[in-house]
Amino acid sequence: MSPVARRQGGAHTGKAVLVAVVGVAVALGVAFGVAALAGRGDVKVRLGDDRFEAGSARDILDDIEEREAPLGFNDVANFRRPIWVDNTSEDADAGWIAVGAFVPDDPECLVQWNADRDRYVAECDDAITFPRSGAGLRQFPTEVVDGRLFVNLQEN
């Protein structure tokens, strides 16, 4: 006789398979339900936060003052919304501006800060420029909360 006895518990295997099948069916049902609702436009799919936390307002202001230039952030929404952040005052709690780092009519055309020209210059056409105030570029609301700078990236 073998030291390991055979079990007579075939019923446990059947229950495990039944639980797995029911679990898969429920998951598929939920997935189809969400897809159907999203297809009708009743559900808004939102991945991530609309507010980008740039960091310490004081540190960002110090960096801007030291470089004498706006500060760029490359990947604030999965490479879709590069922005420039600047401050128009000497106060870390006020005077913040955030602008899209792209030509508003052409999101594929990025704008870079050009210190020699003291302007944002479009990479696709250096004749397209914008002042440091960001006038003409897409503007994003800013807010300082507990010393942290936030930029609201929600579509206007």
Image (cartoon, grey):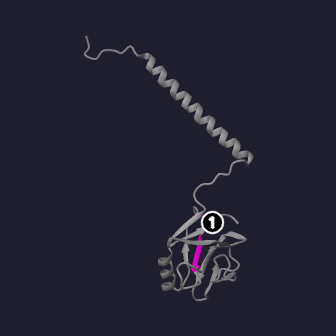
What is the tally of numbered marks visible in this picture? Answer: 1
Residue 57 x, y percent position in the rendering: 51, 75
User: Front-most of 142 and 116?
Assistant: 142
Residue 114 x, y percent position in the rendering: 59, 84
Circle 1 packing at 10 Å, graded few (<14), some (14-19), many (20+), is: many
Measuring 73% from the left and 48% from the top, which residue is drawn there?
A: 41
Measuring 34% from the left and 15% from the top, which residue is drawn there?
A: 6
Instruction: Mark yes or no: residue 62 visible.
Output: yes
Q: What type is the residue that disc 1 sits on?
A: Leu
The span picked out in magenta is 79-86
Q: Is residue 155 above or below residue 17?
A: below
Measuring 56% from the left and 66% from the top, which residue is drawn there?
A: 52
Image quadrant holding the C terminus, namely bottom right
> Which residue appears farthest toward the right when viewing the image?
40
Q: Does the magenta run of residues contain 3? A: no
Residue 108 x, y percent position in the rendering: 66, 68
Q: Quadrant of residue 142?
A: bottom right
> Which residue appears farthest toward the front when viewing the image?
146
Instruction: Mark yes or no: residue 75 visible.
Output: no
Q: In this view, does 113 lie above or below 102?
A: below
- On screen, residue 4 versus residue 14, left or right, reads left
Measuring 52% from the left and 82% from the top, which residue is drawn there?
A: 64
Q: In which quarter of the image is residue 40?
A: top right
- On screen, residue 104 versus residue 116, left or right, reads right
Label 1: which secondary element? loop
> Which residue appears farthest toward the bottom when viewing the image?
116
- On screen, residue 46 versus residue 15, left or right, reads right
Image quadrant holding the N terminus, namely top left
| Residue with the mark numbered 1 | 153
